[in-house]
Amino acid sequence: MPEVAIGLWCIAGFLGTGVLAVVLGGRAIATPLVYGTTLVIALAALLLALDVLLGGRPATATVLPIGLPGLGAHFRLDSLSAFFMLVVNFGAAASSLYAIGYGRHEHAPMRVLPFFGPFLAGMNLVLLAADGFSFLLSWEFMSLASWTLVVSHHQVAANIRAGFTYLAMASFGTLCLLLALGLLAAAGGEFTFERMRTATVSESVAATATLLALIGAGSKAGLVPLHVWLPLAHPAAPSHVSALLSGVMTKVGIYGFIRIVFDVVGDFSPWAGLVVVVAGGATAALGVLYAVMQRDLKRLLAYSTVENIGIVFIGLGLALAFRANGQGPAAALALTAALFHVFNHSVFKSLLFFGAGAVLSATGERDMEKLGGLVHRMPQTAVVFLIGCMSIAALPPLNGFVSEWMTFQAILLSPQLPQWGLKFAVPAVGAMLALAAALAGACFVKAFGVVFLSRPRSSAAATAVEVDGFSLTAMLLLAWVCVLAGTLPGFVIDALSPVARELTWSALPAQAGLPWLSIVPIAESRSSYNGLVIFFFLVVSGVMTAVVVHRLASRSTRTSPIWDCGYPLDSPVTQYTSSSFAMPIRRVFGTVLFAVHETVDMPRPGEMRAARFRMRVRDPAWRFLYGPLVRWIMRSAQRLNRLQFLTIRRYLALVFAALIVLMLVVAIWR
Amino acid sequence: MSPLWFDIAHLFAAGVLVLSLMLLYQDRITAVINVFALQAVVLSLSVGWQSIVQGAPHLLATAFIALIAKGIIIPTALHRIVRKLDVHREVERVVSGGLTMLAGLALVALSILLVQPVVETADPVAREDFAFALAVVLLGLLLMITRRNAVTQVVGFMSLENGLILAATGARGMPLVVEVSVAFSVLIAFIVFGVFVFRIRERFDTVDVNVLERFRGERREHL
Amino acid sequence: MQELVAALPLSPVTLVLLFPAIAIPVLVAISNYRLSAGLNVLFSGLTLLAGVLLLAAPRIRGDFLIIDDFNIFLIVLTAFVGFTTSVYSASYIGHELETGKLTPTFLRFYHAMYQAMMGAMNLALVSNNIGLMWVGLEVATLATVMMVGIYRTPEAIEAAWKYFILGSVGIGLAFFGTILIYMVSSSVIGSGVPAMAWDEIVAHAGQLDPKLLSLAFVFLLVGYGTKVGLAPFHAWLPDAHAEGPTPISAVLSGLLLNVALYALLRFKMVLAGNPFAIDAGAILMTLGLVSLLFAAFMLYRRRDIKRLFAYSSIEHMGIATFAFGIGGPLANFAGLLHMTMHSLVKSAIFFAVGHVAQAKGTQRLADISGLSTTHPALAVGFALGVIAIVGLPPFGVFMSEFLLVSTAFSRQPILTVLLVLGLLLALGALLLRLQDVMFGVPRGKSEPVKASFVPLFVHLLIALVAGLWLPEALVRWFRGVAALLG
Amino acid sequence: MALTVELALQLLQIGMVVAIAPLIMGITRKVRARLLRRRGPPLVQPYLDLWKLMHKEVVVAPNASWVYRRAPYVVFAATWVAAGLVPTYATGLLFSWSADLIAVIALLGTARFALALAGMDVGTAFGGLGSSREMMIASLAEPAMLLISFAVALIAGTTQLSAIAALFSTGDVGVRVSLGLALLALIVVGIAENARIPIDNPATHLELTMVHEAMILEYSGRHLAMIEAAAQLKLVLYFSLVACLFAPFGMAVGGDQSALALGIGIVTFLGKLAVFAVLLPIAETTVAKMRVFRYPAFVGSAFAAAALAVFLRFVSRGF
């Protein structure tokens, strides 16, 4: 059986779990059974993907007699699909494992279980689809299935709104992709990617299709300003689904972009790269700025996803620019960096959402202002969450740093580009990336510091208990992957080389055989990095110092009340909160950009009421784009609505007017 | 076909058109009904003439129906309605009379403009008749939309239908004409019946069963 | 199959017209509502059977009747939806009787009118004679007028009245167009019945006078366009859908609009045969787009659940009209598929909406919420219907919209962008309402629904299968018709 | 054999930076005191302080977690590793390729991350204040630092510190506006990162102005010693970074491992550090501490200078 057929069977299996869930109904066994099944299937698909990617197997394709009439449904499993299948199914497996435990907290499992498997199926299907129709069908099916999960907690009005925004934006994206594919199909004469790939398209068609694909796929991935659904929808879903939405589904969006632009459109001008790079840079910077200002933990994570998507798009845009100029190795570096970051983000963002879910199920709170001190109540969760935070903040020696480092290396190759615009724009985007990296540090210091450290800010946080074994295992697994991918990045890069070769006709030099397992993307004289050595040094120097100090100097410790410069206050409200932590950054960056509005209502001395602090942060995308748009639609609808209340005579007048106009057209015609 | 025959056919058709314009001009309901009755009579003459010209005796039935139903029965019924329902005798115009007439003339011009340049192969009788019929149809519609009064609107619709019959009978050998004219008469009867039953006293706009003003599609108060 | 058809004493075409004709007097005569509902189902079923037999029957091309690829599928579709709706109606009407909204006397009338409408639509579909086609459509319209007003509430009467007046004007204008066509064709073909035969007219389209032909098309467009519900001739449609009994809304949306569009397309084919006539495609595209955009905006302010979906019908007729306007094999294919899918899905939605309105005792959207909590099965059906109608996969509407947008974009980029905007706007509006109805805390009264969901789910299932896989025969068929449409 | 030598040379560098760090701090304090007309502590006072702190008992708050206890070691280790990987007296040491300029910056980020978390652990108002301000400053300083590395790397064509030093020491690159701006930016960032005046005052505990000290307010004993040592190391790191990038003369380049070259390298390195250690307090005493919300302007100027350096890299070669 060809690999692609195995993949399709896995998808059928995922769909089957949906049926299984319906059959089982609301029984208690349903949760472990369904998630257990998805876990097994996801592992199978994961193995398949690994086999294809690492085994260097050639692409396999198949045609099913369904789909568009006369065309059939084409499916193909090549290394690009395999890599993304790996990402998707790794996330899916972790999520399933986590959910075996976490799913027990679900009040209405029938609103989640039947849709979980189909959602996974949809994502996998997108990766395998090899013609326009199957691709978009799976794409939109994936949106639909995830929409049901977003609105699963439907009693909360905000979730409903999130669901609407989500599905509307998703459909917008799908329609953009549809237009892009329509253009390409018109050039190729058929809807299969195979034909579109070989067809030659004019410059303008290629540019339009690329732009449309950027908008379409970008809206799924969360590119600014198409990201608005993401911070609403991702937190609304149950946490294991949030992890999939944020960590995995956005990656499917990126896959869509790569597949259409790199693979199907094929040749393009370097300016396409410029647009993508700039969009990526803006996304990275704005996403993280927004993340810093959030007080809802899951929203913070969702905005951080926006940032990371920006980083990936910077890499992709660079790859486009380099490829358009025939600079294969540089393109391969940029693409590998982007894909590596895709993998990394899927791992640590899933981990962080699992952590947020653990916190949520333990305390019932997502609002960071009401959390704190969980490191004592949930020690294991705290450790893995910390690893996730450090990874996403791009700190060496963990994995997030490696991919960002590679992106920086790709940016530093920009002098090679012949276009002056790119020569200048790319370093500017590099500055944005640097800003994003630094702010991500601040953001996750805040996240971990406020949620897990300090003293509990509510009784719920004070009485939290550690989560179950399944959830912990899933998180631990992901944390290990973060460490491994950070210290042994060469293996990941080598695994990505078939993808890079397929899309940029060039690949990075093999890394696994290099001395000390370091990575050298271009040449050693240019740049190199060795996560393993850094890790080793850090551990050795830290442990050695500690041992020396404890042996040779003092090791005694005494517990005593907090000193706090001599003014210890018992109440936990005296601590810095999430909002106060972000205040300096808000002042510096937010006042103009986000129209931050703060009001403090301070009681006069002697008054007994509490002081109130109110803050409003507005997303510029809502302020300048969606807000006016929605208002315009509503106003137009209201204006047109008068036509519902006309008298019969006026309706007749409308008919009459139309008739006269048409007759005049006839009179004028020729 | 001799020119005289042609001229007579032309005369009748033009008569129907002139009466249509006169309908636009009237501002008393009884006058409107009377002019309409006259138009129906002229129409039946025209149809009868066509029946002779075309040698199609079945058209006489159409002429007869037009005469009886629209020339006599319906005008009588409408007069009754006006009396019974105590409708205002004045016609409520939406647009002023002069303007309506101008629009009517423009419509006549448009109809002739559209039909004139037709290739000469077309039967000239049919062509001329047809331009008039088109104008009558359009004037009928114009009457419907420029008058608020229900009865006037019914008359407008019937005048439109007169145009249809004029066109149908003008088309040589058209099948189904008689059946259609019967069908239209039934339709008009329904409308008249509706006006009577639902007591649409003043305006087509409102089915005046006291409360109906509030509903027009969706309830306005929830707007 | 063919032998079977040959062995029949009457040809299936006759049967398709005969069964409803027999049913009318029978149903008028029967006062027991259970029996008459059952007979209604029976006759609809027989018509469906005859329609299916028609598939195997030889094609016909007479002066009065025509059976070609184009109408045969519409006949089957009409008979099928007519049959399922009659099944639905049987369970629906019982509830209306219990709540006293209808009296048994009116029911007799209702069932007879139902059959009259079905028969008239079949007549319009099978007739080759353009006059007969006109008669069929008008009888169907008048029959539905009666049924729209059947509740005799002030709103229903007003809706029926509006429908009646606008419909009558439409009837007049369409007739005028028909006369014009006859005039034009008779000067070429010679007077008499053949000059009204559609196939003759098409055959001679090139020799017809282009100016008059164009004028005729304009009148037919306004006349039949009123019945298609194209903006700005749509005014009757929302109210008629909202105030009439739900089974009638279902057939109005699902069938009558289709039949009217079918009639328009027949005339478009005539115009397509004449290079000097106006570009019917451009006009259809414009009107389709106007309808789509207009309806999409109107969807946002709807308060009544049935009126909401009535506007959605305007929207979808706009899409189909646009598709046929653009023309070409793919777009025509998309248009045909869209018509089919719309009639299946929209009638399914009305089935669901009828139950929802019965369960909640209101059609006001503001009073309906939390349906997924109180009536899970109904909610699933309703949600699937809406998901299907807004063009989300894996339902058939997605496929037709996919084909349409993707082919249209390279040919009419600007118009297609407008089309896409319209689709998106409509999707947004329907989605908002869907969520409001489905989710949240249930409000108001909520009664159990004792009705069969079979018709609802059968329709959805067909739409689902069609979205993933179209049978080879159907595809070949659609392709043939698409080529026919030019 | 060769490996042993190379390992020894690398370890020498790693050991050297940690050994001289308190001394350098001592020099700056001494000079500063003299400039303020104080006699100042002896040069070895930082060593004595560390010794004293290490032998003291540690006092921790009851709700301090393991993060609080481990953070000082992490901070120290990360800073040490970073400092040990910046070329000081020679280029091309054994592990010089394991971290380039960007990685060194990121390692400092790791240290800062740990320290900021530690500041928030006990849950005091001051700790949070310090962490919050520190991260705000870092969010400006770190991009500036990365842009500096861009400017340098775009000219040198590499981010390897060894390779840059080797290239710049040849003088082939010439004087460039770009490099001048980068140096300026690096100095500003160094001041901000090392909590020197005008950003922060290492000698103050005035609650409204402190940043770094606020984070470590609760620390005592060996923990505090570790943090102090890390701060000293960081200063050395920045000094050696300036030396390596902008004054690479005297370094043993090109794998020249003769005793003479290495000796010259060590001596010039120490000399450079001493000069910087004198210059820093001179600069510090001439300015006043800023208000907290003036920092963005100050650090932002570094960002701007670095960005300008990047954009101007194409101009002014060798004039």
Image (cartoon, coloured by chain):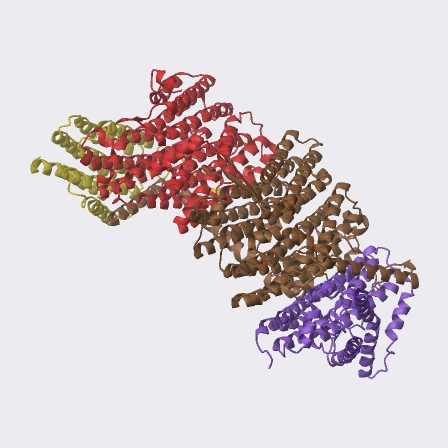
Chain colours: A brown, B yellow, C red, D purple
User: Residue D220: x percent and y percent?
Assistant: 87, 64
| Residue at position x 53%, y 25% in the image | C452
The quarter of the rendered structure image containing the C terminus of chain C is top left
Q: How many marks?
A: 0
Residue D208, placed above or below residue B77: below
Left or right: D131, with A317 as reference point: right
User: Residue A84: x percent and y percent?
Assistant: 61, 47
User: Residue C168: x percent and y percent?
Assistant: 31, 34
Residue C288, placed above or below residue A547: above
Left or right: C188, with A155 as reference point: left
- Residue A227 is at least partly visible in this image: no
**Where, by quadrant of the figure, is residue C86 drawn?**
top left
| Residue at position x 89%, y 66% in the image | D54
Left or right: D116, with A651 as reference point: right
Which residue, as the protein is rendered here, is positioned at the far front?
D1
The quarter of the rendered structure image containing the N terminus of chain C is top left
- Residue in the foreground of this view, choosing between A244 and C343: A244
Residue A540, placed above or below residue A191: below
Residue A249, placed above or below residue C189: below
- Residue in the foreground of this view, choosing between C272 and D319: D319
Left or right: D116, with D316 as reference point: right
User: Residue C64: x percent and y percent?
Assistant: 27, 26
- Residue A46 is at least partly visible in this image: yes
